[in-house]
Image: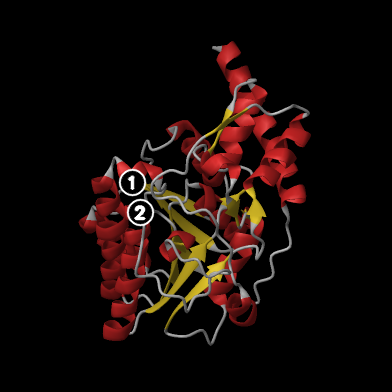
């Protein structure tokens, strides 16, 4: 199939595009290479994809509707995997309009370009953040998500509502995936596991919010990509639906810190801080619905996944240092 993957230079988009290429699909990858985190990392992901047969990279902003519509009409995609978004809860506190543009306007543009080109199925990234301050654990797709506690979460809720409207009005099949704390090689430098690893290797104190009393449903990237694949290709899925993609384990932040420290062979220094605005103390995914409909069966725990990330991180930084020296 010819598939559009938006956000293909991002963490999840890169891994998704690579897996789809492995299976022989023709991939058009779209990214705007914004500078929320170092663009060099995105360029290196994109460079690896561009070396592969079957991949075409397009640099485009989702808010450029004319270019986006032209891309849809030219390619007539079999399906679209929409993973591009402005991420980060804390960043949304100081840069709200970036989220309005990318996550609201950009998502609406994807829906409308898809509708006009006759697209049949759109799979898109939502987030566990939509559950807001929900205290009912584990989070199930039937829980109320009307109380977002960050603008980022509110934009993801908008995505789900807009997708539902387009499915109802135009017959576009839309499948939303609520991701839970995704980690792994080629990850995001703003995520805790990256920040902790970087600080520990430098002998610096790590910032631990809510005094360490945080729990997260840490989900390894390969498991997430398997769930995305199912949403893209399985037949007999509903016209509009939403699924949790998590590891179905709510793990202590302090346990994550210990696993990283053990991998690095260091004693972590910690700066205990209050919980940040927009953060929630616990996330925990009920994945029974995804197990049944998407055959989703995550199998990677922190003890397996974190060493893979740490190994990759060391190699990535070693390559960075070699490039710096050669200059």
Whole-percent x and y of residue 321? 61, 19
Pointers 2 and 1 in contact (C-beta within 8 Å): yes
Residue at the spot of label 2: 150
Which badge, 2 or 1, comes first in the chain's sequence? 1
Query: Can I make out residue 285 in this image?
Result: yes
The reply to whether residue 81 is in sight is no
Q: Is residue 242 left or right of residue 96?
A: right
Judged from the image, the secondary structure of the residue bearing numbered disc 2 is loop
* 303 vs 145: above or below: above
Q: Which residue is the site of mark 1?
A: 92
Left or right: 170 as drawn, with respect to 224: left
Quarter assignment of residue 311: top right
208 and 156: which is toward the camera: 208
Q: Nearer the viewer, mark 2 or mark 1?
A: 2
Numbered disc 1: secondary structure: helix
Q: CA distance from mark 2 to mark 1?
A: 7 Å
Q: Quarter holding the C terminus? A: top right
Toward the viewer: 215 or 213?
Answer: 213
Q: Which residue occupies 65% across, 66% down?
A: 248
């Amino acid at each position: 199939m010819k598939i559009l993957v938006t956000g293909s230079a991002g963490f999840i988009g890169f891994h998704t595009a690579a897996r789809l290429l492995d299976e022989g699909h023709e991939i058009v990858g779209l990214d705007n290479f914004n500078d929320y985190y170092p663009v060099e990392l995105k360029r290196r992901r994109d460079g690896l994809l561009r070396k592969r047969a079957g991949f075409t990279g397009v640099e485009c902003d989702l808010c450029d509707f004319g270019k986006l519509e032209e891309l849809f009409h030219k390619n007539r995609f079999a399906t679209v995997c929409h993973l591009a978004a402005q991420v980060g809860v804390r960043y949304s506190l100081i840069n709200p309009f970036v989220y309005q543009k990318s996550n609201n306007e950009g998502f609406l543009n994807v829906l409308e370009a898809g509708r006009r080109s006759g697209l049949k199925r759109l799979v898109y990234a939502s987030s566990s953040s939509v559950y807001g301050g929900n205290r009912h654990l584990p989070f199930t797709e039937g829980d109320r998500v009307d109380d977002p506690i960050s603008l980022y979460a509110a934009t993801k809720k908008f995505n789900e509502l807009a997708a539902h409207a387009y499915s109802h009005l135009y017959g576009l099949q839309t499948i939303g995936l609520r991701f839970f704390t995704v980690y792994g090689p080629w990850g995001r430098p703003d995520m805790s596991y990256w920040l902790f690893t970087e600080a520990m290797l430098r002998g610096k104190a790590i910032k631990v919010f809510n005094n360490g009393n945080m729990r997260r449903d840490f989900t390894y990237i390969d498991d997430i990509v398997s769930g995305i694949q199912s949403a893209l290709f399985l037949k007999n899925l509903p016209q509009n639906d939403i699924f949790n993609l998590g590891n179905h384990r709510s793990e202590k932040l302090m346990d994550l810190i210990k696993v990283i420290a053990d991998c690095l062979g260091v004693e972590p220094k910690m700066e205990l801080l209050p919980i940040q605005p927009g953060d929630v103390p616990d996330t925990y995914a009920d994945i029974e619905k995804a197990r049944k409909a998407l055959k989703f069966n995550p199998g990677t725990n922190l003890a397996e996944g974190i060493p893979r990330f740490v190994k990759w991180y060391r190699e990535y930084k070693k390559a960075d240092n070699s490039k710096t020296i050669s200059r």
